[in-house]
Amino acid sequence: MRRMQLGARLRALRRAAGLSREEAGHPIRASESKISRMELGRVGFKERDITDLLLLYGVTDPQEHQRVLAFAREASAPSWWHSYGDVLDPWFQTYLDFEQAATLIRTYEVQFVPGLLQTEAYARAVISLGDKTAPDEIDRRLRLRMERKQLLQSPEAPKLWVVLDEAVLRRPIGGTPALREQIESLIEAAESPGVQIQVMPFASGGHAASGGAFSVLRFPYQELADIVYIEYLTGSLYLDKREEVDRYAAAISRLFIEAAPLVDTKSILNRVLKEL
């Protein structure tokens, strides 16, 4: 979270100084794309670079200078998933940073139950579908995913609002017993005040998100804009341009309307269970 706060603060200071990302990159010998990644909290920070940027941005208040540097030091501290670095792709480490900092996560899924809601057996089956299927690596990835789920039990848990395509509930990932356990877990999760689950039935036909799965994450600070996360086979996309985020936010809002109402979720899940 500190890395994101720091990036957002640097972006605000740069804009206040009337400088482009390209202009900001010259003093620290950085490309425009690196400045963009810094401002999104996707890369680490060197104190020297921060000091040079503050000088360029005209920050003369000693307290502000020290506050920003303190953010930089805290942002450099390893996250809880640091010990899983051997099995964690760099692009997903960025998502975990965002996930931990978010206050609201809205997601649409067409293939799998979202990671935060997966049971152990279901998660193991999903992980085993990947290319890296060495047993010890599967075990470590599974431990990471189960530890990640603890976020929903923490006092700082984000609100999670999920729309599941009905195909997610019908696809027997891990076999019928694993899927049954997973659906039972979804029924239980839907009772939590911080988790809302809706189902997009097959009968609905076309809908607002026919392009595929995505998530929209919101953060607790005004200077932190919403982020759209889209995962693909070998990596992910993070969208932060206002016009792109607005289109995805509008799409997820329409999905909430087009999907079966929240009050029907439990009955839908129970019906799927009976049909397994």
Image: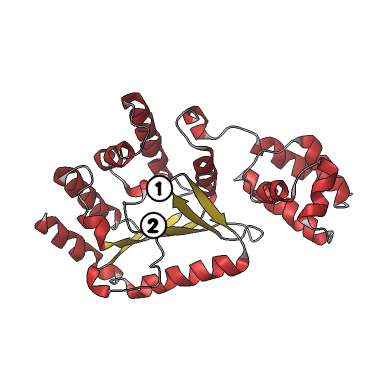
The amino acid type found where label 2 is placed reads Gly
Q: Earlier in the sequence, mark 2 or mark 1?
A: 1
Q: How many marks?
A: 2
130 horizontally vs 40: left or right:
left
Q: Secondary structure at mark 2?
A: loop
133 versus 181 height, above or below: above
Do residues under tags 2 and 1 come within 8 Å of each other at their CB atoms? yes
Residue identifier under label 1: 152
Percent of width and height locating residue 172: 20, 49
Percent of width and height locating residue 60: 89, 49
The amino acid type found where label 1 is placed reads Leu
Residue under the image location 42 percent in, 40 percent down: 148
Residue under the image location 61 percent in, 60 percent down: 225
Percent of width and height locating residue 72: 71, 39
Residue with the most extreme top position: 136
143 versus 239 height, above or below: above
* Residue 267, disc: none
* Residue 194, disc: 2
The answer to whether residue 224 is visible is yes
The answer to whether residue 63 is visible is no
Nearer to me, 66 or 160: 160
Residue under the image location 39 percent in, 45 percent down: 153
Q: Secondary structure at mark 1?
A: helix
